[in-house]
């Protein structure tokens, strides 16, 4: 069986990162890439232009759409929005301070389990929506090169799925893969 190559790309720096705002889906307001974010994304697009990218999947948030569009312009690959790739839901923290969210759910266990009172989506729920995404891509794009543009936590969990880690390993172990703004990681499945 041919291997599918995933290029996991975190969106570039966006306005909400600078403003310290928790921004998930549905977006409280649109947060666009910053100039630095566009520079980060341009570098990833340049790297990906040397690959024969077959498709680009992206989360339905403005910052990931903008990231995916830059990559698509450089690679010529078609774009596909996929709700399963969205940022974990921030519930009552949406549009508020990121620091307040992190104060309640500190790293590294952040949102591994939520208390159910604030509408914050736990990582187990995110993982459950990513499993069928992985299955779909591997079956439909077997032997292809697939770019996935999403968010740090979502990509960390997807990476864990692709390399066979449990939820806890994806979040807590040294095997976990952390994604910085504009960063890309390649995984063969």
Image (spheres, rainbow, N blue to C red):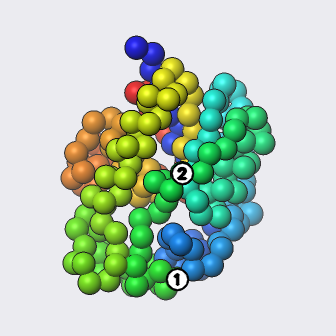
**Which labelled disc corresponds to residue 82?**
2
Which residue is located at x 78 percent, y 42 percent? 73
| Secondary element at image label 2 | loop
Which residue is located at x 27 percent, y 36 percent? 164
Q: Position of residue 25 (x, y in %)?
A: 51, 69
Choose top left, top right, bottom left or bottom right for residue 74.
Answer: top right
Q: Does 108 sit left or right of 62 as displayed?
A: left
Q: Position of residue 45 (x, y in %)?
A: 70, 41
Which residue is located at x 58 percent, y 59 percent? 60
Choose top left, top right, bottom left or bottom right for residue 103.
Answer: bottom left
Residue 178 visible from this viewpoint: no
Q: Does 129 sit left or right of 97 as displayed?
A: left
- In the image, residue 136 sits, relative to residue 68, either above or below, namely above
| Secondary element at image label 1 | loop
Location of the C terminus (image quadrant) = top left
Residue where numbered disc 1 is placed: 95
Label 2 vs 1, first from the N-terminus: 2
């Amino acid at each position: 069986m041919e291997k599918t190559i995933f290029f996991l790309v975190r969106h570039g720096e966006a306005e909400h990162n600078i403003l310290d705002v928790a921004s998930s889906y549905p977006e409280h307001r649109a947060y666009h890439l910053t100039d630095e974010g566009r520079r980060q994304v341009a570098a990833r697009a340049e790297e990906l232009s040397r690959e024969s990218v077959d498709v680009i999947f992206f989360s339905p948030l403005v910052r990931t759409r903008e990231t995916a569009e830059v990559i698509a312009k450089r690679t010529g690959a078609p774009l596909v929005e996929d709700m399963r790739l969205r940022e974990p839901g921030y519930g009552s923290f949406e549009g508020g301070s990121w620091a307040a969210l992190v104060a309640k759910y500190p790293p590294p266990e952040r949102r591994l389990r939520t208390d159910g009172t604030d509408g914050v989506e736990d990582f187990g729920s995110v993982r459950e929506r990513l499993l069928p995404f992985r299955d779909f891509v591997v079956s439909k794009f077997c032997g292809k090169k697939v770019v996935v543009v999403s968010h740090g936590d979502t990509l960390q969990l997807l990476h864990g799925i692709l390399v066979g880690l449990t939820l806890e390993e994806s979040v807590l172990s040294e095997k976990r893969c952390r994604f910085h703004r504009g960063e890309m990681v390649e995984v063969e499945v």
